[in-house]
Amino acid sequence: QKEVEQDPGPLSVPEGAIVSLNCTYSNSAFQYFMWYRQYSRKGPELLMYTYSSGNKEDGRFTAQVDKSSKYISLFIRDSQPSDSATYLCAMTLGNTNAGKSTFGDGTTLTVKP
Amino acid sequence: GAVVSQHPSWVICKSGTSVKIECRSLDFQATTMFWYRQFPKQSLMLMATSNEGSKATYEQGVEKDKFLINHASLTLSTLTVTSAHPEDSSFYICSAPPWGAPNEKLFFGSGTQLSVL
């Protein structure tokens, strides 16, 4: 079993929809949680990072962490066609460089106009 | 945000030749950089950690003699795929954490698509 499981998708939604992307993990020692967006044939781009349980909001994006359930989510409000990409969750141990994060396999999202 | 520049963005080469990929941090110094490969519809697989001024650290199963890494300055790391073969065809990505937040953030290069004929 993988340390990080991510809903594989693909996910297709109409423009304006609320999107929910999810990851579960098994290692309770993970302390930092990140979401990256990756467009086709490009490097990932950091969207959100959180340290503690709870919600963190940035514009149309909300990252949610529930450490007791070992579950993280990324919500996208008012989704736009430009949000169409693959979204990767990633997690890091407290004393580990983010470069050694454990990544999910990604969820591919398509937002249709 | 910080910028990591990676070149080339794509390269096609003949089997048996060597290919060099460059990764530069443009507006910050990076004592550590990371190299990954990514197969279609799969996540990032860490290959090695590049350390400025010292030898790279390779992940288990990665051939250090095949994937040569050099981190000669605080802003440049290079990955050379030596004697490339078709099975080395993949998307290679570098990353660097910003100074002061190594646990939290990564900035990635734009990736290099390598196709070996």
Image (tube, grey):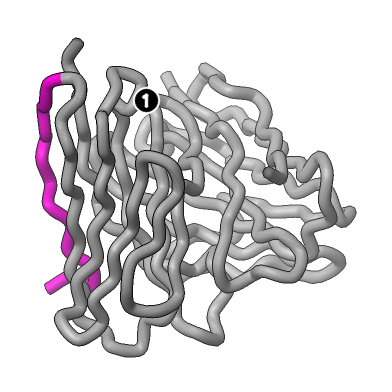
Give B111 or A56, whichever is nearer the viewer.
Answer: A56
Q: Chain of mark 1?
A: A
Residue type at mark 1 is: Ser
Q: Position of residue B28 (x, y in %)?
A: 82, 51
Corner quadrant of residue B45: bottom left
Residue at image coords 33%, 28%: A83
Residue at image coords 38%, 69%: A91
Q: Is residue B30 left or right of residue A59?
A: right
Asked whether residue B112 is drawn in magenta, I would say no
Q: Is residue A84 left or right of residue B109?
A: left
Is residue A60 shown above or below A67?
Answer: above
Give A19 or A1, whichever is nearer the viewer.
Answer: A19
The crowding category of the residue bearing disc 1, from other C-alpha atoms within 10 Å (few below 14, some 14 to 19, many at least 20), is few
SS at badge 1: loop
Is residue B17 shown above or below A87?
Answer: above
Residue at image coords 45%, 54%: A48
The quadrant the N terminus of chain A occupies is: bottom left
Q: Position of residue A24 (x, y in %)?
A: 17, 69
Residue corresponding to mark 1: A40
Q: Is residue B52 left or right of residue B85?
A: right
Asked whether residue A10 is drawn in magenta, I would say yes
Give A1 or A76, whichever is nearer the viewer.
Answer: A76
Residue at image coords 83%, 44%: B27
| Figure disc tally | 1
Magenta-tinted stretch? A1-14
Q: Which residue is most to the top?
A: A113
The quadrant the C terminus of chain A occupies is: top left
Q: Position of residue A50 (x, y in %)?
A: 44, 68
Q: Is residue B60 visible?
A: no
Q: Position of residue A97 (x, y in %)?
A: 58, 73
Corner quadrant of residue A108: top left
Q: Is residue B56 visible?
A: yes
